[in-house]
Amino acid sequence: MSVVNLPLKEEPVGGRTLPLDAAEARMFRRPSEWRIFWEAFSRDRLAVGAAGLIAVVCLISALAPVLSPYDPTVGDNALRLAPVGTPGHPLGLDGQGRDILSRLIWGGQVSIIIALLYLKTRAAGGENLKDLFAKFEEAEEPRKKWKERVRQRLINSGRVTSRSS
């Protein structure tokens, strides 16, 4: 049993209650939700590593104008489809001669914007994807039943065998 989950109580002494001293009150004080989260999160090395990777990608994407070696929209037709390791282009070039590393760096900004828009709509009372997919499945249910009824009628009439479907 954890001490942090015990409620802060006053001990009755001789029919009256005496307040706990400050040290005891601190000992029985429940930690904040953020503290509980941080303690659990910091113990999980995989989660800390993933958060670090996300932070690095966000930082690189935010600094794309400074870090990007080339313009991601301008191509060089002379070097189209250059392989990985081409001098000056560590990840090579695509079919239109654009630097792939620059396109990855700038593309991170779009991914971050899409993720933030999803979070914003979710915080504004939007539906989560699970609820949205459930609604689509419910909308498809009458169609599935209709198809099944037609299939059964064709089988019953002898026009279609049950093995052919």
Image (cartoon, rainbow, N blue to C red):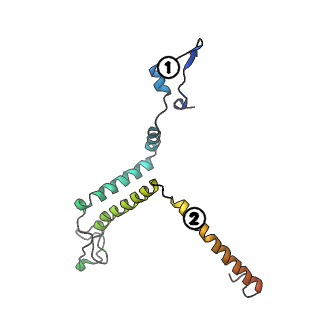
Q: Residue at position x 43%, y 56% from top?
A: 119
Q: Quadrant of the C terminus?
A: bottom right
Q: Residue at position x 24%, y 60% from top?
A: 67
Residue 46 relative to residue 103: left or right? right
Element class at badge 1: loop
Residue 36 relative to residue 153: left or right? left
Q: Crowding at label 1, few (<14), some or many (≥20) Cα neighbours within 10 Å?
A: some
Q: Quadrant of the N terminus?
A: top right
Which residue position holds label 2?
135
- Which label is found at residue 20? 1
User: In this rendering, is residue 100 above or below 22?
Assistant: below
Amino acid at dot 2:
Lys
Q: Considering only order in the chain, which callout, 2 or 1, is on the residue closer to the N terminus?
A: 1
Quarter occupied by residue 139: bottom right
User: In this rendering, is residue 99 above or below 25?
Assistant: below
- Residue 54 is situated, as x and y percent measured from the top left of the image, at 37, 54
Q: Nearer the viewer, mark 1 or mark 2?
A: 2
Residue 21 relative to residue 97: left or right? right
- Residue 8 is situated, as x and y percent measured from the top left of the image, at 53, 26
Amino acid at dot 1:
Leu
